[in-house]
Image: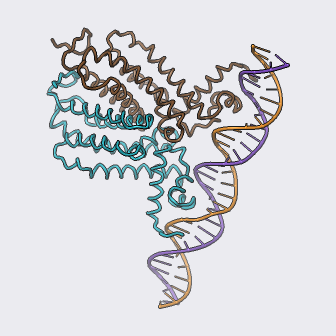
Chain colours: A brown, B cyan, C orange, D purple
DNA sequence: AATTCAGTACCGACTAGTTGGTATGTAATT
DNA sequence: AATTACATACCAACTAGTCGGTACTGAATT
């Protein structure tokens, strides 16, 4: 029966199945058997790769984080030279993602941490770590844009990064509640407008096409 | 043993226990036995009041909605005459709430809908209904403020209402992940600043989002 | 005023199925 | 030969939900 005997491949199949199932049903409602069945692996195989369900949750969070890092790190907007344009490109990219199926664009970490924060400490920590890393990646561009367009602003780049993620996470909740991304799209447009306004004040010099044409 | 034989009281105790437990552990991880134990009621009593766990979820969502309606409807900021001040008062009120324990200020509806949206349709619908009602309550003040301060703005009051709720829901996720409300507070401060900016400028033009504001 | 009686509120043991996890076996790889 | 990578069979604890029974209530009947 066992056609392939590739440890890494099996592990990846389990993690992918876990990612999809947990995004759809949540962490608690997703059983080990569910994951095994979806991945085409038996219980024995599962517990060969992960010593507990919680440890799978941690591993799934880590895998999701590096997947996100890869997706956003290699997205087209990263080629833009202006940090503000990269930031707005990120938002536009996330808005574009809302065109796919709900289960494709929602965040595993946000979903898991909601139910796991009080009862599964290791999962909570893994979600926190992944989200924090993503915020810090963003904050780098925000900081560069700030130095360029709003050096005297009172807000911190990090807080803007967390704000962006809060809007996105909240938008996902409404996409789920309404079974439609429409409200989420509008929220992210508000977010985009706010970001523009943050970099629009006082001494701004921009050679870019979009916003400021004041002299 | 049975001191009081008050149907409504027992039902309320079950709903209160469900609210607290689900906010802490999520919907799936909260068992009927958990709820019974916390409420001091037996299984028989539970299923006398609710014909299924899902129906309890729906009832809990409804109760939570009317609780919210009552809290925000009778909050001090409602006395303010200016609709914009009422709106900002709402934000300040929510920021102040972040001083309590996590389990006290998080949203049952947002928590439940995350895990239930695909697998428990009735619960999803109840959460949607509750959140939508709350947004519409908010949107009323937003609309009034718009007529007063930004009559020509291109955004809709409803979309601003959903945006506010998205930020709040997302902030809760980070409060859980970080086990601290600090990040949530900062996000709500950004939200507050955005709302101020929406009503601050001479919005005599529509659609063009760039607006220069003075400090 | 006492009795009946139907209905409501609740109890707690039970069930059939599910849960995460284990013990043991075995074929493939090193 | 030893280790790895699984599969199979199994278990104790737990799961939502059931069911027969009990205690209390309040109104109608006696």
Q: Is residue B45 visible?
A: yes
Q: Quadrant of the N terminus of chain B?
A: bottom right
Where residue C6 appears, as percent x and y from the top left, is 53, 74
Q: Quadrant of the C terminus of chain B?
A: top left
Q: Residue at x 64, y 20 (%)?
A: A9
Where residue B26 appears, as percent x and y from the top left, is 50, 43
Query: How many numbered marks appear?
Result: 0
Q: Between residues A67 and A120, which one lies in front from this camera angle?
A: A120
State whether residue D11 is above or below residue B188. Answer: below
Compared across the picture, whether A191 is left or right of A8 comes to left
Q: Residue at x 61, y 37 (%)?
A: A31
Q: Residue at x 64, y 19 (%)?
A: A8
State whether residue A71 is above or below residue B38. Answer: above
Q: Quadrant of residue B154?
A: top left
Q: Between residues B139 and A73, which one lies in front from this camera angle?
A: A73
Q: Quadrant of residue A52?
A: top right
Compared across the picture, whether B163 is left or right of A212 comes to right
Where residue B63 appears, as percent x and y from the top left, is 40, 53
Compared across the picture, whether B59 is left or right of A62 comes to left
Where residue A117 appears, as percent x and y from the top left, is 49, 38
Q: Is residue A25 visible?
A: no
């Amino acid at each position: 029966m066992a056609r392939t005997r590739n440890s890494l491949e099996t592990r990846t199949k389990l993690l992918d199945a876990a990612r999809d199932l947990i995004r759809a049903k949540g962490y608690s409602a997703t059983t080990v058997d569910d994951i095994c069945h979806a991945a085409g692996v038996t219980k024995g195989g599962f517990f060969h790769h992960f010593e507990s369900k919680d440890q799978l949750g941690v591993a799934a969070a880590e895998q999701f984080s590096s997947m996100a890092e890869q997706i956003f790190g290699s997205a087209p907007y990263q080629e833009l030279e202006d940090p503000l344009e990269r930031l707005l490109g990120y938002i536009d990219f996330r808005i574009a993602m809302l065109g796919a199926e709900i289960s494709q664009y929602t965040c595993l970490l946000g979903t898991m941490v909601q139910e796991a924060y009080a009862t599964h400490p290791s999962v909570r920590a893994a979600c926190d770590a992944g989200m924090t890393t993503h915020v810090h990646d963003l904050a780098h561009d925000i900081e560069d844009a700030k130095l360029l367009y709003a050096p005297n602003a009172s807000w911190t780049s990090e807080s803007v990064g967390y704000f962006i993620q809060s809007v996105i996470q909240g938008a996902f909740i409404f996409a789920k509640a309404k079974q439609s991304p429409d409200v989420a799209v509008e929220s992210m447009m508000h977010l985009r407008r706010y970001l523009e306004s943050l970099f629009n004040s006082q001494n701004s010099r921009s050679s870019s096409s979009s916003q400021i044409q004041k002299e």
